[in-house]
Image (cartoon, helix red, strand yellow):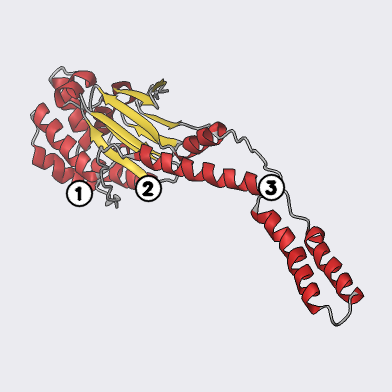
Amino acid sequence: MEVNQQVSGMIDELVGEPLGEQLRKAREQKALTVREAADSLRIMPYQIEALEQQDFSVFKADVFIRSYLRNYAGLLGLDPQAILDQYQQKHFVERVIPIVTRPKSVQLPCKKRYVGVVAVLAVILLLWLINRELPQIDKAAQLQPLVEVEEQILSLGADSETEISSLASEDLAAPTNALIAGDYDTVAVAVDVEPIIAEAVSSAAEHRLELNFSAECWVEIKDAEGKTLIADIKREGDNVVVEGAAPFNVVLGYAPAVVLSYNGEAVEINTNTRTQAARLVVGRS
């Protein structure tokens, strides 16, 4: 980047007056301050300064640079096409800009989905606690009647088959009938599911950012996974609401024009005093 600027400066010295110097002198001849020129074009003062200093790296895309140069040249009474041609020849650097799809401002029906998730978690936990607390049936108690029947069979003679069958049937049926009749202790389990529900709702819920704009400003917001939720220029009166996983990485081109809130609470924006821009992370626990 520094090499390109040095080459650009050498060309300006050999060919003629630098582009930025032309803009600055024309503005001063019209007795306009940087703020007045910015207000006339409805852009930020730091963008006027960047054009006059030929610091085109502050702009997100070449289309913005050309638009601002054309409008600024027209305001100052210069030939817009000549200014654009000079920019193309000496300063244009091709940049690949990712295509960003602007998210629709749609409120998703999340509440029903979260209630269903919480209900399933509560039922699973309740079943697990009940199964853990139920008494285990003593296997030795189940086998005891069989041992007694075997001993009685050995003590009887071979001619007592009918009596043996009757005895075995009665003894074997005893534990089964006891189980069918429900002859075991009933365990009552009290489960407090409110903390579980609160935790599930907290982890599943998406977080919300709201931005209100009083002037033109570039805004870029990415969620915790690095997904770009919005990357666009907003103007006076615009309102933007985005939802996603926190924390959010927020970049503002002109921070004084933005009022920001996170989950309904106001967020303080620390602004760069030189560029009037801001970069912040919102929702970090």
Q: Which residue is mark 1?
A: 89
Q: Which residue is mark 2?
A: 3
Residue 188: horizontal and vertical position, in percent? 65, 38
Q: Nearer the viewer, residue 267 or 21?
A: 267
Say the numbered circle drawn on residue 166: none
Q: Residue at x 21, y 40 (%)?
A: 64
Q: CA distance from mark 2 to mark 1?
A: 16 Å
Dot 2 crowding, Cα within 10 Å, few <14, some 14–19, many 20+: few
Q: Is residue 209 visible?
A: yes
Residue 14: horizontal and vertical position, in percent? 23, 44
Q: Amino acid at mark 1?
A: Gln
Q: Which residue is mark 3?
A: 134
Dot 3 crowding, Cα within 10 Å, few <14, some 14–19, many 20+: some
Q: Amino acid at mark 2?
A: Val
Please say if 230 is above or below 211: below
Label 3 secondary element:
loop
Task: Farthest residue to the bottom: give it.
Answer: 158
Q: Residue at x 40, y 21 (%)?
A: 265
Label 1 secondary element:
helix
Q: Nearer the viewer, mark 2 or mark 3?
A: 3
Q: Which quadrant of the view contains residue 105?
A: top left
Q: Nearer the viewer, residue 35 or 173?
A: 173
Residue 8: horizontal and vertical position, in percent? 28, 45
Q: CA distance from mark 2 to mark 3?
A: 78 Å
Dot 1 crowding, Cα within 10 Å, few <14, some 14–19, many 20+: few
Please say if 62 is above or below 199: below
Q: Nearer the viewer, residue 66 or 2?
A: 66
Residue 62: horizontal and vertical position, in percent? 23, 45
